[in-house]
Each structure stands twice: as structure tokens, then as C-alpha cells.
Image: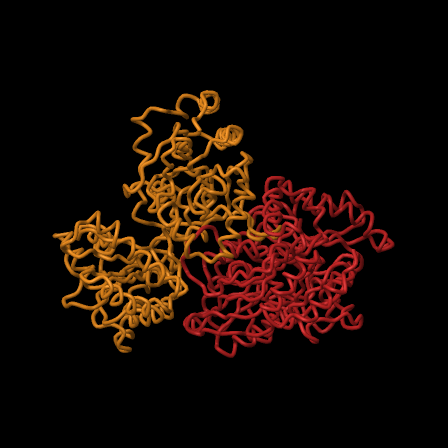
Chain colours: A red, B orange
Amino acid sequence: MMTSNVFLDEAAAILGPRGLTRDAELVSPWLTDWRGRYTGKACAMASPASTEELAQLVKLCAAHGVPIVPQGGNSGMSGGATPDETGNAILLSMRRMNAIREIDVEARRVTCEAGVVLQTLHEAVEEKDLRFPLTLGGKGSATVGGLISTNAGGCQVLRHGSMRALVLGLEAVLPDGQVYSMLTPLKKDNRGFDLKQLLIGSEGTMGIVTAATLQLVPALADRVVIWAGLPSLGIARSLLLHCEDMAGDALEGFEVMPQACLDAVLTHLPAARAPLEGRHAWHVLIEVVADSASAATLRERCETMMAEAFDKDLVDDAVLSTSETQAEAFWLLRESVAPAERERGPAVQHDISVPVEKMPDFVETTVPMLEAEWPGTEAVAFGHLGDGNVHYHIIAPTVTDGPAWQKNEGKAISRRVHDLVTEWGGSISAEHGIGQVKRDELARLGDPVALSMLRAVKNALDPQGLLNPGKLV
Amino acid sequence: MMTSNVFLDEAAAILGPRGLTRDAELVSPWLTDWRGRYTGKACAMASPASTEELAQLVKLCAAHGVPIVPQGGNSGMSGGATPDETGNAILLSMRRMNAIREIDVEARRVTCEAGVVLQTLHEAVEEKDLRFPLTLGGKGSATVGGLISTNAGGCQVLRHGSMRALVLGLEAVLPDGQVYSMLTPLKKDNRGFDLKQLLIGSEGTMGIVTAATLQLVPALADRVVIWAGLPSLGIARSLLLHCEDMAGDALEGFEVMPQACLDAVLTHLPAARAPLEGRHAWHVLIEVVADSASAATLRERCETMMAEAFDKDLVDDAVLSTSETQAEAFWLLRESVAPAERERGPAVQHDISVPVEKMPDFVETTVPMLEAEWPGTEAVAFGHLGDGNVHYHIIAPTVTDGPAWQKNEGKAISRRVHDLVTEWGGSISAEHGIGQVKRDELARLGDPVALSMLRAVKNALDPQGLLNPGKLV
């Protein structure tokens, strides 16, 4: 189907000159996902300036049968914001809707539009001595709307939950162009099930998030970042329980990586130094935070916590950050694992979760299994042990032709990893979403009952199937 | 439609002799809701012993077009578990499915069946030094399945959220008899939107909850309950913010009542004593808790908090409980407000919420307005100020014929209260649900877009409309 000129003329009338473009130079950067795996086409790129403009556009699309691919910062990991190759769809940029409508300091919440970039949000609320407690690598481009649509995670989920837990109110344009408007949060509201949950994590297939009211927390007054070395992931899990007991809600991060990952990072960052003297099977980064009320005793509590961990044989060595610079240096090591791994050569990557308590066994069982089944590969797991979520990379043997290996062995390995995760009661997408990249694997491995519920709801809300077709389901 | 003997015979074969009865003596106590407002009929009462039995029964009902009315402890406030008067429906008691399948002490969670009574759950986890942090008046009969289906609230929502926030995993039988099985919690799972949210709060209209995995918290080591008197609800709200700042997550309860409510309670409980000497426009109950790690400093922190509240003119008088007996005595006063109000005579009751920050203005604006519009009535609001949720009763003039007043003036008053709540951006059901009692008011006042989403999802999952017909939507 070619998109009609009538449609484009009417869309231009709704959106104005800044709101619609077919200029290839402007559009094409947004037609490839940021990992460079997918490139699509679009009949035009729409950039509405308001919810009202978007609602009119969606009604027009419904009338003309034009598919819509919503996009925020185009920094998703699963190709969920890239159109297909037909060129039938309109690419919907939400980036112009970037107003921070209100920061309510007393109630600790912010209402902002979908196109607000995460880092901009962080900075705006910090000025009010508040904090939005979700962050991730792509914070310089990821938008609030994209973070909600993919239920983004990051490194503070342990304490604050993923995006779902932080959304208090939502505004969205539905597939028929009606506006769902529930921005003003009620702490208690029992008029049926919670409709906003249909939109959070549905990757733009049920509606287009236009604005949200988000939970804020008090600004950090201080933090201590601890780097520890220990002999096994099982002991890391025991250390996690120990820290949860002793630090309670002050524990905000608990990240793990094997020695091989740290080695790769130190190669990748020549100026960086290893936090500990010796080598350890596993390294753990622990973040403990304090607001102004609890800052005075923070360091002492962390020292007691780690001293007891030594007494219980839960760590072999550990160091506490003594400055914000050192805290940041420790985090830089953690955040450099993914780029350092990429530098090592071709690999297949997985973003998986299993129940938290099973993760040590899962990794210790499946790493040698996969390395044996594909000789020469190296399997590394790192990330959010506290959430039962690791990034699980299988690095190709050094001699291999990369692209061919990824296409053949790599694909087979991914199926095997996803089979194993499913056997262990886990998820093939812990935080990156399904998008295009895992859609077929979800169809293959997802619980048939859950999939049929998902599809029934999708068809009920979007009977024409115009919202982000080919993604998720 | 009369229910066929074929259906009943097949149901009996599935459920066995203990699982199906038509004995009026056994069935009739469950055909009237506990507030005595609705009485219905049923072709039989089914009491399945397992999820598998229930799944077979639901398939049979779907084949024969027999409606199903699920019921837990029959202690709901909105008639949501009472069948209609046709006798076509089967009443589904979930009370036989009452196993506590597993308490995982390390992970702090419990997996139990839908028929487990809340108080039984409390006792079972207390034995493991854990706590399920949701409680309410009907805890001796309310079941886990009912609490989930109605997204129950209570007096600890301020800190721990309503039922929705405590459900980690869910198992349910869907309208076609398929079993949705996601009991093992994953902290992170981004395979589409969160399906269990469709079932929580949907009052048995989308599926029948059969089991759940619930979040637990450490047992309480100590608590202090504070009773304070102050001049206005606006000041009560400032005191709430002060306590949130100073006590943080240790603040578990913040309940308010006007002097008139306390007077009624003291009449209702002749042995009880007023906590404070003088009379105050508003009374506040504040609960601050501690686990074993924070118990040592609890009293001192509460004393500092209240001393600073005095300095800021946020309270006129206050007393801290000095024993668990006294703490319980303070709570008994709070819990006796509803029965004491009922004793005062005919009234219409509302369970409403508005955004927390608007509640003082809402009450101070609408109480004199309603009392002026219906001369001789008395309007009282009490309850969960910290959640923006009060129970709002309008007591009839003393001279009136009760039932006639409730039917005529009472109904008009309720419409007026619901209109006002809607104008103020609030909810006509904060925690009691919609059921039968508020279904027409929801249809009248609910956001049309939200209602059409609700109905679209309901029709998609239950196209025959057999699950709890006539409730919610």
C-alpha cells in the first residue's frame, strides 16, 4: 500500500510545517535502530507538538489505515522503534513534546511530557533537591515515553523498582485517537483494574504515552560504593542477603561481574585501575545511599556491614569508596563492561532473568554447559544479581568469521540460552523488551495462555493493528 | 434460562460430593452480602478443591453458558460476590482452596491459595518472624483471593501500598478455563505489559484468582502509636508531611477523625477513655514502627518528631503509647468509628479518594455545603488521610424514617457526593470496589475513555460475559 497524498496533506495540515517532514536527511537517522541491526522505511516523520495534535493524527491514521511507529530517543535495545521495510508506516517522533509541566516538591512528583530526555529530567528535579531514581546508560537520549513503553530498568531497580513502580499517572493517545487522561495521581482508586498498566511495557502497541506523573525521592546526601572480591556467585547471593538485612532500604545497587569482565574493562580503559589487589572469581559493586537524615552514620554502617561480612566469610577482600570521585570510578568500571565486551569481538548477547535465588545455580550450571557445547566460546554473565537479571554474553571463538558466526552458531546459541532460561522459569527479556529482535522467540517460548491474553487485549484495543505493527506480538 | 441437569451432573462428577451442593441450608448464608443489601439465587454452590477442578468446571460453564459468581469470605462492601436473582449462576466458593503452599523465609514471600483467610495468613507468617503488611476489619473472614480481586486497602497502605503492590505472582483460571500460571516471581520481566494487573482489582470479572505469591516484610520488633489533637485538617496534612520527613518509611499509619466521631466511639465503647484531656476539632492516630535493627531508637525518634511538631504549631496536644496494650487501645478507638457511626442511626456512606493534597480543602468545603443542602444532616469524614482516602458518612436527621430517608434523600446525597468527588478529580471507590452498589454510578461518572478500555478488555477476555456478570462494568 502506498500512503496517499490526501493522508499526507491532511497530516501536514494538522501538524504544521515543523510537525511533518519527508526530507530524507532529517528522517533517515531515525530509521535505523541504535545497535544498527534494523533499518526501515517510513512515508514521513511526524513530530506533534501536543497531545491534541497527536490525537488528531492518530484519528487520521485510523481513517486511512496508516500504521504508526512511535519513537522516543531511538536508544532501545530491541529494535522496537524502527519501522519495517514497506514504507507504509509513519514514524512518530515524540521528541518535540518535551515540556516538564510541573514539579510538585511537597508531594515529590513531576509531571512531564513523553519526549523529555532522562538526563534533562534528572537535572530538573535535582535543582529542587529531589531525585528521579532510575538511570541507565542511554540517559542522554532515552525519553520518558520510551522508558515507560519499555518498562525500563537500570541499576537502581533493587530499591526503587523498574519504571512501572515509578509511574503515578499517565496520559496516552489510544489507537482510535481517544485520549486516556489520568495524570493526577490518586493513592487509592478501586474503579476496576489499573488501566495504566496496559500501557506500561507494551512497547507502543496499545497506545502512545504522551505524558506521565512520576514519583520522586529525596536527593542523595551521600553514598558509599563498595567493591568486593569473592569466590562464587552463590557467596555473592549470600552477601546480597546480608547487605539487605543490614542496610535495608539504603541498599540501592548490587552488581556482579566475573574476573574476565574486569580484565576486559581494564584493557578497554587503560587509565583505570583495579579496585582490589588480587584476582577474584567474582567482583561485586555495592551501593549504599543516605539522605540528609541518615548521612551522618552512613560510613560507619557500611564499615560494620562489611566487617560482619568478613566474619561470615562472605568476602575475600573489599574496599569502600572514600570520595565521590572514587565512587564514580567504581561505577565507571561497571558501566564499561558492555563496551569492553563488544571490543573483544563478535558475541551474542542475552538479557535474561530467573528467580533471584536460582541465579547462582543457573550461571554455574549453564556457563560450562554452553562452553562445552560450542567449543572455543566464552560465556560471561554480569549485571544486576539483586534483581535476578544478568546480561549473558557468549563470545565467539577468536578464529571465527564474526558475522557468519553470529548468523549461524550465534543464532543456535541464543535459542539454546532462551530454552535454558525458560526451563529455569525465567524470562528471555528481563529489561530490554521484545521489540523485533525477540518477537519470534517470545512466540516460540512464551506461555501460550499468557500470549493469548496479550493478543486478545491487543486486538481489543487496536483492532486494525496500526500501532507499532510487528513488535512484541 | 434454567440450568440443565446435564450441567449439574457433570459439575458434580468434576467436583465430587464435597465440591457441589444445592442444599439450601448450606448455600443460603452465602447468597446475601454481609451488609445485607443484596440477596441473590444460585443454581448450586461449587467448592473446588484444586485449580485443576476449577479449570474443568469453568470449561463446563463456558460450554453450557452458565454464569459464575466467585466468592471468598463474603465480606466485601459492594455486593461484588452476590449473584443476581435469576438463579442462573453458579456460586463459586473458593474457601476449600486454603492451602499455604510455601513460606520462603529467605526471599520473604509466601505462596498460598485463594481461600486462605487473611488472619490465618498473618499467623502463619508470624511464626516465621515475618509479617504480611496488609490488614483490615474483616481479616477473620476475608480471603486472599477476594483481597486480590478487590485490590484491598486498609490501614497500612501509606507505607506498603494496597494489595496490588504486594502481589508478586499469580495463578488464575481464565473465562475459557485456561490456567494463567505465573506464581514464581521474577523481579524483572519485560515480555509485554504485566498481565497479572488485569486480574488484580477486576472483581472476578476477568478471571478467577486461585493462588498468589505475596511479599512479606520483617516482623515488627516494636511500635509507637501516637494520638494527637489539632485544630484543622489542613494542619493534619502539614503534620503528615512533617512525620513523613522525620520518620520516613517507619511511618505506617496516619488516620484522622473529627471530635464527633471520637464522641460516638466513646458512647459505643463505655469502657474506653479519651486519649487526650481536652476536645479538639480533629484527632490523629500516627503509627511508627521498627524492626529489630531500628527498635532501640524508636521511642526517642518519635519524641523528637513530636517535639518538633509542637514547635512548629502542628499539634495542640499529643500522647505516645507506652505499652502494646495502650497502642492497641488507641487502634480500637480508630477501628470502632464505623460501628459507632452505625449505632447513631441511618446514614449514607461513601468510600472516596481525592489527591492527598486536596483532601483538607475537599472536606472543609463539602461538609458545610452538604449539611446546608440537606438541613439536619451531619457529615463526617474519617480515615486514611495519608492515602487521600476518607470514609464520608452523611447521618440522617434524627426525626426521619430511616429506610425511606436512605432510599430517597440518601440516594440523592450519594449522587451529590459522587459528583463532588468527580469534580475534585477523585474516585468514587477508593478501596471498597464497585461491585453492584456503585456500578451505575461508575457508568454515570467514570471517564468514558477509561470505561471503554475496561469494557473492551472485558469483552476480549470474556466474550460470553459469564464471569461475575452485573458487577463492575
* Residue drawn where x is 62% and y is 72% of the image: A49
* Residue drawn where x is 54% and y is 63% of the image: A171
Figure check: A460 above or below A108: above
Nearest the viewer among A147 and B397 is B397
Residue reaching furthest to the front: A6
Residue B60 x/y as whole percent: 51, 28
Residue reaching furthest to the left: B270
Is B42 placed left or right of A355 in the picture?
left
* Residue drawn where x is 29% and y is 69% of the image: B365
Is B217 placed left or right of B365 in the picture?
right
Tally of numbered discs = 0
Nearest the viewer among A102 and B112 is A102
Residue A167 x/y as whole percent: 51, 62
Is A295 placed left or right of B282 in the picture?
right
Classify residue A226 by image quadrant: bottom right
Residue B473 seen: yes
Nearest the viewer among A396 and A224 is A396
Is A217 placed left or right of B397 in the picture?
right
Rendered-image quadrant of the N terminus of chain A: bottom right
Residue A317 seen: no
Residue A68 x/y as whole percent: 69, 60
Classify residue A189 by image quadrant: bottom left
Residue A247 x/y as whole percent: 46, 61
Nearest the viewer among B434 and A202 is B434
Classify residue A327 by image quadrant: bottom right
Figure check: A288 above or below B141: below
